[in-house]
Image (spheres, grey):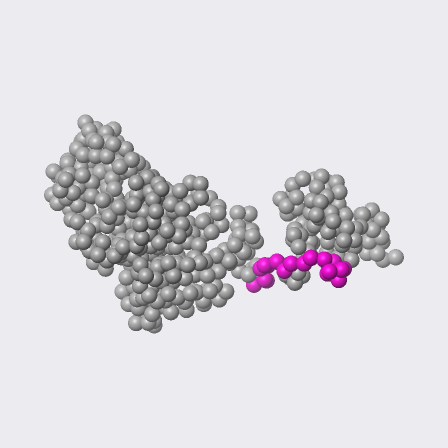
Amino acid sequence: MKARERLLAELKASVPEVTPHDALALQARGAALVDVREPDEIAQGSPTGALRLGRSYLELRIEEAVPDPQRAIVAMCGSGTRSLFAAADLARLGYANVSSMAGGFARWKSEGLPVERPFALDAAARERYSRHLLMPEIGEAGQVRLMRSKVLLVGAGGLGSPAAYYLAAAGVGTLGLVDHDVVDRSNLQRQILHTDARVGTSKVASARQTLEALNPSVKVVGHEAQLTSANVEQILAGYELVVDGSDNFPTRYLVNDACVKLRIPNVHGSVYRFEGQVSVFWPGRPQRPGPCYRCLYPEPPPPQYAPSCAEAGVLGVLPGVIGLLQATEAIKLLLGIGEPLVGRLLYFDALRASFSELSLERDPACRYCGDGREFPGYIDYERFCASAAA
Amino acid sequence: MSRATIRIPMPLRGYTQGAGEVPVEAGTVREALAALGAAHAGVLERVLGPDGELRPFVNVFVGSRNVRSLDGLATPLADSDVVAIVPAVAGGLR
């Protein structure tokens, strides 16, 4: 008898086997059905509700997935052989009630038992996102979450460029870009999605080209329009959060008001010469609501007090720093990890090389997000900002 | 009177000969801003309105706290407090 057959005979004698129907009944009573097949086999289908741990990392992952050593485990594979080895290993790890499913997935399927096709990362995605997959805070579930996420970037300029670039690299599934501008040579000192050859072409089209070249699996949705009260909700519809990298106060207030109404986070960034500000405005946050932009600045400065970077200048690297802080906050919010910058403003001074954190509080009397307030409606933002009192 | 430092944001440094920080001796935020205005012409009207109150597009923080959540311009200052003026900035990314 060959060594392999001898070992299998020993395992069959020592590991209890159950039929797929028994396995389903055990699962219904709380047992963990552990699929130990390879990712490409699992991608073709797997028993509904199975824990898909694979064989190669089984011993390393089982304790996280099944912390209770008394919980019953049914190991399953393709035909019922690999699961014998897996079950023996699990018993050695201290699991008291382990069995192997005879006939494996082939029999499960032929007996018409429930199957689902899990959203699984293919080999290319596994390689691309391997550094994310290694971290327990992200892992496969987090990466899949990112790939199903939709983020809207207002502005494909200085802040939107680095933010969109890294969100695409991270695998955020859908990136919406709102911009109606064309690439100007003076943009290229900081707007790294664009190129010299694309001066004069649409920023949205230029950004799409760069983002798709980096990560073809990301869907880039262009909105070549100026945000207005009339189109803002139509454009924001379906996005989970907004990264505001706009360049003017009317758009800032419009984005704020729409995010307040739609109850989604507004990841805010702004830059001026050597300084930048980042915060997350999210009054609609469940449990712990934060302030909105109007809680902080109820009214914009009058135009003569509000020079733009076109007039005042900006260090090209600075929107890179601030835009990437926005991207970091966006990813944390999508994954639900860490402590978001809600109710806090991060102030970066590049010349001092210092960050200060300022605490922002909700204004309970805020006209837009205050306690018990109905949404008062959109306003004429151009007029609101042009007529701000000096 | 306390020795405090006012941190001047980039958009207002044109009024302070480029200085990012201005030391003042003051007992309250209002006195600190008055001392700033006395030392550097033009800056105060960007922070305070004609009514002498904070403009709605400017916030002032003592340490990490917004004075609007404290005692406003009457917020007292202690030695080595940092008073930061933080105006609304649109961005300017075109």
Q: Is residue A381 above or below residue A219?
A: above
Give the residue drawn at x 69%, y 53%: A35
**Of residues A247 and A19, the one drawn nearer to the viewer in this rendering:** A19
Whether residue A315 appears in this view of the structure is no
Q: Is residue A195 magenta?
A: no
Residue at left 73%, top 51%?
Answer: A24
Q: How many marks?
A: 0
Find out whether residue A111 is within the magenta segment: yes
**Where is residue A121 drawn, in percent x and y?**
58, 59
A111 sits to left or right of A340: right
User: Quadrant where the N terminus of chain A lies?
Assistant: bottom right
What residue span does the magenta drawing correspond to?
A: A107-124
Measuring from the top left, give residue B26's x and y in whole percent: 18, 31
Residue at the spot x=53%, y=52% of the render? A142
In this rendering, position of residue A388 left or right of residue A84: left
Identified at 72% across, 41% down, the residue is A95
